[in-house]
Amino acid sequence: MKLKFIVVLMGALALGLSSQANATEHHTAQALEHSAMATAHGQDGHADQLLKHAEEGLKHAEAAEKEHAEAHVHMTEAVKHLKEAIDHAKKGHADVGTKHTEEAMVHMRQSIGQ
C-alpha cells in the first residue's frame, strides 16, 4: 500500500509541476494532489487522513471552481464528490470515501482536458 501511495503522490506531483502558472490550474493540481493522497490513505483504511486530505482538496477545488465556474462543470462534480468523501470519512467509511475521491479526480482531470 505504501508503494501505491508513493506512485499516486509522484503522479500528482508531476501533474502539479507540469501545470502552467495559471491560478485555476494551480488549484486544480493541488486539489488532485490532495485527492490522490486521500485516496491512498482511504485504501489503507485511514479515515482520519482521508478526511484531512479530502478537506484540503475541497478548498482548492472550490477555489478553481469559483475562478472559472462556467468552464468547470467537471470541477463542480469534483466538489460534490469530495464533500461526499468527507462525509463518509467522518463516519469511518474509508472504502466509500475512497470511491468518491477517485471519482473527484476523474472530474478534475476532465476539467483541465486530461
Image (cartoon, rainbow, N blue to C red):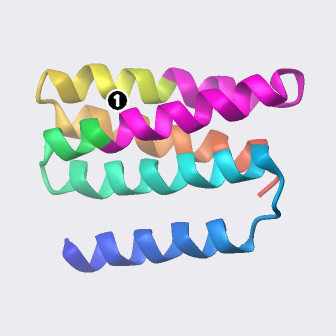
Q: Tell me the crowding category of disc 1: few under 14, some 14 to 19, or many 20 or more residues within 10 angstroms, Cα based.
A: many
Q: In this view, does 81 lie above or below 41?
A: above
Residue furthest right in the image: 71
Q: The residue tagged with tag 1: helix, strand or loop?
A: helix
**Is 79 colored magenta in this rendering?**
yes
Image point (52%, 20%), residue name: 80
Indicate the quadrant containing the C terminus: top left, top right, bottom left or bottom right. bottom right
Between 34 and 81, which is closer to the camera in this rendering? 34
- Helix, strand or loop for the magenta stretch, by majority: helix
Q: Which residue is drawn at 88% across and 21% down?
A: 70
Which residue was labeled with disc 1?
A: 85
Residue at coordinates 43% horizontally, 56% vertically from top-left? Answer: 36
Q: Position of residue 31 (x, y in %)?
A: 55, 46
Is 109 placed above or below 15 here?
Answer: above
Q: Is residue 35 left or right of residue 107?
A: left
In this image, 73 relative to 41: left or right? right
Q: In which quarter of the image is residue 108?
A: top right
Give percent across and percent down for residue 48.
15, 39
Q: x and y percent of residue 87 in the render? A: 28, 19
User: Magenta span covers which residues?
Assistant: 53-80
Q: Quadrant of the N terminus?
A: bottom left
Q: Please give the name of the residue rendered at 65% of the width and 39% of the height, measured from the top-left corner.
A: 107
Taking the image as shown, residue 16 lies to the left or right of residue 93, namely: right
Quarter-of-image position of residue 83: top left
